[in-house]
């Protein structure tokens, strides 16, 4: 299970709408809760640094990832995953996504955008046993930033 606040969902939705018809992307920072869930504590927005001519690809700015990784050292937080949008495609993982899913512990959050409007948000993680994406139960609540 993964926990996000409505504010975090709103932020990602807004980013997805602003990036439309391209994909938006960024990182998810958070921590594990004692019950085996994952709590997202903040969203780190990144420009999509993939070739601008590509509408259906994303790449988080590597410098943002490096800075984040360094900044989280010796804290309780960690990079728990990342998010990106699917302009005019459902919030399902794509073949391209699977090809890029090299870290089984990372959560993939996908927001579907239809005609410029953000809709469904879903979370996935690779099941190491099958090598396929499994959908994670996503809980929205709380007012933590
Ligand atoms: Zn995708």
Image (cartoon, helix red, strand yellow):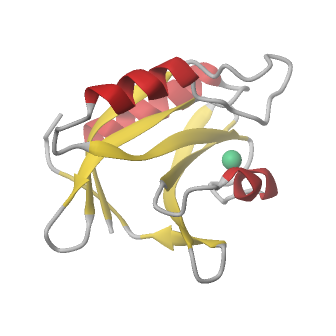
Residue 71 versus residue 112 in the image, above or below: above
Residue 39 versus residue 104 in the image, above or below: above
Looking at the rendered structure, the number of numbered marks drawn on it comes to 0
Q: Residue at x 79, y 16 (%)?
A: 52
Residue 49 versus residue 81 in the image, above or below: above
Snapshot quadrant of residue 60: top right
65 horizontally vs 90: left or right = left
Whether residue 9 can be seen here? no
Residue 72, position as x, y percentages in the image: 26, 33
Residue 10 versus residue 53 in the image, above or below: below
Residue 8, position as x, y percentages in the image: 32, 38
Residue 43, position as x, y percentages in the image: 35, 33
**The C terminus appears in which quarter of the rendering?**
top left
Snapshot quadrant of residue 19: top right
139 horizontally vs 61: left or right = left
Judging depth in this view, the residue of 139 and 66 nearest the camera is: 66
* Residue situated furthest bottom in the rendering: 129
Judging depth in this view, the residue of 74 and 5 nearest the camera is: 74
Judging depth in this view, the residue of 65 and 116 nearest the camera is: 65
Whether residue 104 can be seen here? yes
Residue 48, position as x, y percentages in the image: 63, 22
**The N terminus appears in which quarter of the rendering?**
bottom left
Q: Residue at x 66, y 30 (%)?
A: 59
55 horizontally vs 70: left or right = right
Snapshot quadrant of residue 9: top left
Q: Residue at x 55, y 56 (%)?
A: 103
Q: Residue at x 37, y 32 (%)?
A: 69
């Amino acid at each position: 299970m993964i926990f996000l606040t409505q504010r975090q969902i709103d932020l990602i939705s807004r980013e997805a709408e602003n990036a439309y018809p391209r994909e938006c992307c960024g990182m998810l920072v958070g921590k594990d809760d004692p019950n085996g869930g994952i709590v997202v504590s903040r969203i780190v927005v990144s420009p999509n640094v993939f070739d601008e001519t590509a509408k259906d690809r994303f790449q988080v700015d590597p410098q943002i990832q490096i800075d984040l990784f360094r900044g989280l050292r010796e804290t309780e937080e960690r990079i728990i995953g990342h998010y990106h949008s699917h302009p005019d495609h459902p919030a399902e993982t794509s073949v391209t996504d699977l090809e890029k899913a090299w870290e089984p512990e990372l959560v993939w959050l996908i927001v579907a955008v239809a005609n410029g409007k953000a809709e469904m948000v879903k979370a996935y993680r690779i099941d190491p046993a099958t090598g396929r994406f499994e959908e994670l139960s996503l809980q929205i609540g709380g007012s933590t930033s």
